Image (cartoon, rainbow, N blue to C red):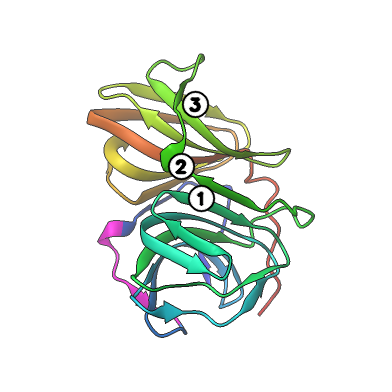
């Protein structure tokens, strides 16, 4: 399966407008944003766990990165409420599920193969720091290495947000709204801009809270054929 698989093209998905699709696991549904492959895939999705649903134990050969949007995600390592940002690197293993149900934004097979950094960040406890280079932007760093820069950003109301993207960028709107390319983005809208482009987004009266990932689109490995 190929869905927005070419990183050299702009991609937009207004996920809240999509139907939920069943997965092979009972009680787990997803909204696909980007995908290259079948069940073993390089993928970006919003995934919903019904109360009591659970995957069997499995290894993330290509790594897994996710942000809990609603509810409480759980595995044998702990409970992760809304706002938790987790990176399970390549070759990590767990048994994911949720007793009360949850919704997560998740990316698979998009790690540097040698990355072994396990990261847990409770973003609701993070301070937001003003970006000295961009008026109206406050930032909470989540993860940075030679391959990528992941953060939460708050964009002030009625503000033009501009950002050069020499290696591309990816944006998931968590709260608020903005207009980009003449198109309005609402909660859970996803935008990917290719290397060499520039973000130019105009926020509305409530501003915006956005998950941001930069510098990674030139280095994403291909998943195995499966």
Question: Is residue 182 shown left or right of residue 153?
Answer: left
Which mark lies nearer to you, 1 or 3? 1
Is 99 situated left or right of 144 in this image? left
Residue stretch in magenta: 16-23
Q: In the rendered view, does 12 fall on the left or right side of 88?
A: left
Task: Kindly identify the residue that appears in the image at 29 percent across and 35 percent down.
Answer: 178
Are the residues flagged by discs 1 and 2 in contact, CB closer than 8 Å? yes
Q: Mark 1 points at which residue?
A: 85
Furthest-right residue in view? Answer: 114
| Crowd tier of the residue under label 3, counting other residues whose Cα lies within 10 Å: few below 14, some 14–19, many 20 or above | few
Q: Which of the two discs, 3 and 2, labels the residue nearer the N terminus?
A: 2
- Residue at point 55% right, 54% down? 86
Judging by the rendered image, the residue that carries numbered circle 2 is 123
Residue under the point 35% across and 45% down: 174
Q: Residue 163 carries which label?
A: 3
Could you give the CA–CA distance between mark 1 and mark 2, rounded to whole angstroms? 7 Å
Mark 1 or 3, nearer chain start: 1
Q: Residue at x 32, y 34 (%)?
A: 208
Please state which of the two labelled residues, at mark 3 or mark 2, is closer to the viewer.
2
User: Marks 3 and 2, how far apart in space?
Assistant: 23 Å
């Amino acid at each position: 399966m190929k869905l927005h698989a070419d990183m050299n093209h702009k991609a937009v998905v207004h996920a809240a407008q999509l139907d939920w699709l069943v997965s092979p696991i009972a009680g787990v549904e997803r909204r696909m944003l980007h995908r290259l492959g079948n069940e073993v895939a390089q993928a970006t999705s919003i995934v919903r766990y019904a109360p009591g649903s659970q995957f069997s134990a499995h290894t993330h050969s290509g790594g897994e990165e996710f942000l809990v949007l609603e509810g409480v995600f759980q595995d044998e390592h702990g409970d992760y409420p809304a706002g938790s940002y987790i990176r399970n690197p390549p070759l990590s293993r767990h048994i994911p599920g949720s007793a009360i149900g949850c919704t997560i934004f998740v990316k698979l097979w998009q790690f540097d193969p040698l990355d072994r950094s396990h990261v847990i960040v409770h973003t609701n406890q993070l301070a937001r720091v003003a970006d000295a280079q961009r008026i109206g932007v406050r930032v909470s760093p989540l993860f940075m290495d030679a391959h990528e820069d992941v953060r939460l950003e708050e964009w002030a109301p009625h503000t033009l947000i501009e950002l050069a993207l020499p290696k591309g960028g990816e944006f998931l709107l968590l709260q608020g709204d903005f207009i980009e390319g003449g198109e309005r983005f609402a909660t859970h809208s996803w935008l990917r801009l290719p290397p060499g482009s520039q973000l130019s987004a105009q926020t509305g009266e409530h501003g915006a809270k956005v998950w941001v990932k930069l510098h990674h689109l030139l280095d994403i490995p291909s998943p195995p054929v499966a």
